[in-house]
Image (tube, helix red, strand yellow):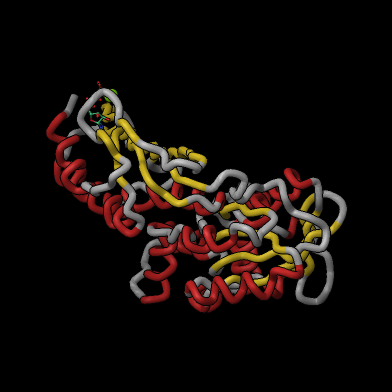
Amino acid sequence: MEFSLIDRIRERTAQGRDDVRLGIGDDAALLTVPAGQELAVAIDTLVEGVHFPIGTASADIGWKALAVNLSDLAAMGATPAWALLALSLPKAEPAFIDELATGFAQLARAYRLALVGGDTTRGALTLSVAVHGFVPPGKALLRAGAQVGDVVFVTGTLGDAAAGLALLQRGGNADARSAYLIERLNRPTPRVAAGLALRGHAHACIDVSDGLLADLGHICTSSQVAAEIEVSLLPRSSALLDLFDDATSRQFALSGGDDYELCFTVPAQHVADVQADLARLGCGATRIGRIVEGSGVRVRDADGQWLEPEHRGWDHFGV
Ligand code: ADP
Ligand code: MG
């Protein structure tokens, strides 16, 4: 169905790869997994008004639908290769499709990722992207490997996307700092190179999609350990700190979603190597706490007090 729309998508996302024997156009794609590699697969769905605000530019929607999936591959330490795109659209508008495919392709090209198929139907605006990547057997970064004594790190800065969303909901956001935060919401950067660099060093890794507390909580649950983090160490951008008061920016950093940074744990003897490797990639990572015995995530305030759950922002941000 809708072949002209599919052709428009295919033209804009074309990517030559030897491992794609047959891409868009037949009943299924035919792909060759490199010998000796495991296939890492993930899928995420974005629904208009739920996962991106109504009115988001179509190029940003295309970018974000791929970015959130590449972030999952990054968190596994996998090299991206292929994607499928299932698209549900209220109406067949060529200009909208062209921009959406262009935003998708901008990010895909950076990773030589090929869009090899998908599905197109009529309905509420919804994008499901499935991604496929490669990882050497046994080398994937899991949530389950954290050990007592590990140092907890996070890449980049936290809370920017939640701040961007708050600014959009408030309206009026013409200045450069607001634009930066809104860009962080609409065009997240998947930390693919960082994920690859962490293979063999990190014990556990997850991408921060639902907020640091929730996602670090998943590492703790899977690994049967607890984490202690220090609010004073949370990396926050100057734009976030300039535009929001300390309590709000702290809540965004602890509980805001959509940042797509990596949170990972590293044994003490690998900390220096990891910091050097990530610095070389131009992807800063900040030490925010450590893994201890027990369960759950505990948060210590700047004055050394443990924060109670109601002060962490769980309720406000629906973690
Ligand atoms: P079928 O009915 O056999 O599933 P479709 O008409 O749905 O065929 O799709 C035709 C071809 O176009 C298939 O190769 C499919 O993978 C591809 N395709 C459909 N929609 C998309 C899309 N949104 N993005 C990429 N490829 C798509
Ligand atoms: Mg189909």
Q: Is residue 18 at least partly visible in the picture?
A: yes
| Picture quadrant of residue 150 | bottom right
Task: State the residue at coordinates (28%, 47%).
Answer: 17
Q: Nearer the viewer, residue 109 or 96?
A: 109
Note whether 130 is above or below 218 in the view shown: above
* Residue 149: image location, x then y, percent: 82, 63
Q: Nearer the viewer, residue 17 or 102?
A: 17
* Residue 239: image location, x then y, percent: 48, 75
Task: State the residue at coordinates (47%, 58%).
Answer: 192
| Picture quadrant of residue 186 | bottom left
Q: Kindly give the residue lying farthest to the right in the view shown.
A: 293
| Picture quadrant of residue 251 | bottom right
Q: Name the image quarter holding the N terminus.
A: top left
* Residue 293: image location, x then y, percent: 87, 54
Q: Is residue 57 at least partly visible in the picture?
A: no
Task: State the residue at coordinates (62%, 45%).
Answer: 138
| Position of residue 164 in the picture relative to residue 244 (left or right) | left
Task: State the residue at coordinates (21%, 50%).
Answer: 99
Note whether 217 is above or below 5 in the view shown: below
* Residue 282: image location, x then y, percent: 48, 74
Q: Quadrant of ligand 1?
A: top left
Note whether 91 is above or below 187 in the view shown: above
